[in-house]
Image (spheres, rainbow, N blue to C red):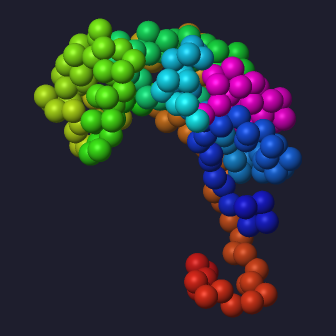
Amino acid sequence: MLETKHPFSLLTKNALVERDIDLLAPLAAENLVSVHFSVTSLDPHLSAKLEPRASAPHARLRAMKRLHEAGIPVGVMVAPVIPWINDSELEAVLEAAHDAGASTAGYVLLRLPLEVAPLFRDWLDTHHPDRAAHVMSTIQQLRGGKDYDSQFGTRMRGEGVYADLLNNRFKLARKRLGFNPQNSHWPKLDCSRFLKPLPPKKDSPQGSLF
């Protein structure tokens, strides 16, 4: 990517991205990369239930800070936001990420396409049986009475009163904390200097993109 001046962004929930600081820092110096961390909750117990194979919240924030200190632009994605499970943490996650050096922020409402819906229902019945019905009722209100609506433009945010309140909370927190005021949570990278890569030494059986 550095050789061809090819800009790109990473979205991860794994603190092991720290291992690539030596590769990412030279790209960042030329405005060719940004790294965004998905953070679901600051509660390690809830995070472990939701994402048992992902890095703990404090580890993600630590990695975010280390990348920021190395001059690599970092951002946060609060995702997924789940009604009555982690939605109350929206502002706290944004504040913690901002303190760790994040300059951009976004959020995504829980999505339940296809086989994900029954898996999530099972998760609710296991971990939050007392509020499972309330969570699913709110989700269906956001999705036109269904578990999921794939309509472009609303699938990330939902529709209705709850969706509007959540969006307003996000915008107010983003403004208060001083995040990038643009609607997009992706920073603008330099897309003007791409260089066609040198031909491979050997022909590839997969052909060439160029």
Q: Nearer the viewer, residue 10 or 193?
A: 10
Identified at 13% across, 28% down, the residue is 145
Q: Is residue 71 magenta?
A: yes
Front residue (pair 17, 43): 43
> Percent x, y for residue 22?
86, 47
124 on left or right of 54: left
Which quadrant: the N terminus?
bottom right
Does the image show residue 102? no
Is residue 197 at least partly visible in the picture? yes
Residue 23 covered by magenta stretch = no
Give the x, y percent position of residue 43: 57, 13
Q: Is residue 170 left or right of residue 203?
A: left
Which picture quadrant has residue 146? top left
Counting labels gives 0
Residue closest to the far front: 126
Residue extent of the magenta highlight:
54-75
Q: Residue at x 63, y 22 (%)?
A: 57
The residue at the point 30 percent across, 14 percent down is: 129
Q: Relative to residue 102, is residue 28 drawn left or right?
A: right
Residue 71 lies, in percent from the top left, at: 81, 36
22 in relation to 120, above or below: below
